[in-house]
Image (spheres, rainbow, N blue to C red):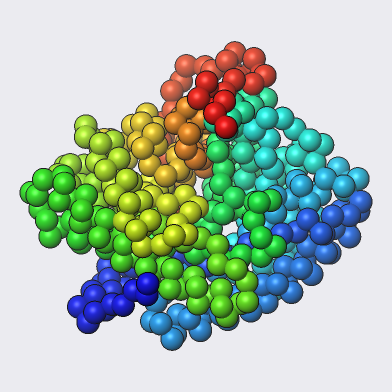
Amino acid sequence: MSYLMNTDEILQTIRMIDQQHLDVRTITLGLDLLDCADESAARCAGKVYDKICRRAETLVATGESIEREFGIPIVNKRVSVTPIALVAAACRDESLTEIALKMDAAAKAVGVNFIGGFSALVHKGYSDGDRRLIASIPEALAATERVCASVNVGSTRSGINMDAVARMGRVIKQTAQRTAENDGLGCAKLVVFCNAVEDNPFMAGAFHGVGEAECAVNVGVSGPGVVYEALRECAGAPFDVVAETIKRTAFKVTRMGQLVAQEASRRLGVPFGIVDLSLAPTPVKGDSVARILEAMGLEVCGTHGTTAALALLNDAVKKGGVMASSHVGGLSGAFIPVSEDEGMIAAVREGTLCIDKLEAMTCVCSVGLDMIAVPGETSAETLSAILADEAAIGMINNKTTAVRLIPAPGKKAGDTVEIGGLFGSAPVMDVHAASSADFIARGGRIPAPLHALRN
């Protein structure tokens, strides 16, 4: 059955776009690069460059034409590729940085904002390709502008690879040091996952999973400002009304995203994958998840009641989205990145929101500890322990969790890291001084929880 919008709904959508920061946050073209495998990293890199340029040649122009014709802002056009650790498994070279350089060159050639997939999946163990890719991450992110990396260290079915967790603490530290002149910017392009999904259109964690088609279009829609305005109109109403209001708003936003996704799919001649309905904030005032939570009655995000408010928000967004499209996927829900949300930044500066409270909030939202700056002197073991805590939340709750930490060189708690663009700026948050080094040094694998044995 087709869905027809009446005049009032059309006017509402126009108002959402014009006044409430509603946008399509990204059109992401997923590409399978397994046919680019080669024993030579240089030849593999060349094949990667050629395929990205060939298949993504019209992506940006297509997005821009849809923007003009539909009047819907499309903020980013991106590419995600097969995890490069798989593509480069046949390479004999120790360093895979050359492939990252060619990915970066291809991203610039086709005009996309970011390219994701310099990635490895090591939740149960390493292959040689995984080891070489992870070792290449610090140099690759320092030498490129648009390449994003991710590593999946755990899953509900396999447990947590603590050797990988320990290694990633060191990799984050090395990446920050290599990009010290930019306050550790490279770390903003590096995500550590538990239960990573194959069809996520959002950076920095996007990659094109092996279960995906040769090529697919995934769209990420965002609208914190729209939800915020809707909640302002039901001040003092009971939570049943709040949930219904969010669901109706998410329905409209998802419909818009599906419209764009299907049109992009038709024009590009590739399958439509999913719509990811995620409330992904920006540094712009009025485009904040924290302000939505405060609109429910919290004086400041982070105070008691914040986790319950976020749980309601995340669930209602998903319920509204699945009613609007049969292909809702990715991460879908509410994101709580600190640097990208002006309300979160304000709550941190006020002292109400701390890392421990953020960790509790990640139990009920879409991702995890995202875009958090910590003191540059933070040890690799402490970084790994933070990764382990977040991976445990994902593993036990059978949900995706992710961590983007920026140990900003030369910065201490209370300082500010200026990242720029959609990344915004981040107040440096304090971490616990007590050591986790002996815990991280154990290595091995934290076993999967019992319910992971279901088939």
Q: Residue furthest front?
A: 1
Q: Residue 409 appears in which quarter of the rendering?
A: top right
Q: Does 417 sit above or below residue 380?
A: below
Q: Does 406 sit above or below residue 263?
A: above
Q: Image point 54% across, 53% down: which residue?
A: 200
Residue 428 coordinates in the image, percent (x, y) = 42, 39
Q: Quadrant of the C terminus?
A: top right
Q: Quadrant of the N terminus?
A: bottom left
Question: Is any part of residue 226 visible from this angle?
Answer: yes
Q: Image point 19% across, 60% down: which residue?
A: 230
Q: Does 304 sit above or below residue 150?
A: above
Residue 56 coordinates in the image, percent (x, y) = 67, 72
Horizontally, residue 12 falls left or right of residue 364, namely: left
Horizontally, residue 195 falls left or right of residue 303, namely: right
Horizontally, residue 254 falls left or right of residue 385, namely: left
Q: Residue furthest left?
A: 236
Q: Does 263 sit above or below residue 437?
A: below
Question: Is any part of residue 285 visible from this angle?
Answer: no
Q: Residue furthest bottom?
A: 69
Residue 145 coordinates in the image, percent (x, y) = 64, 60
Q: Residue 372 appears in which quarter of the rendering?
A: top left
Residue 129 coordinates in the image, percent (x, y) = 80, 41
Q: Nearer the viewer, residue 318 or 234?
A: 318
Q: Image point 88% across, 48% down: which residue?
A: 91
> Total number of numbered labels?
0
Q: Nearer the viewer, residue 178 or 50?
A: 50
Q: Image point 18% across, 50% down: which residue?
A: 242
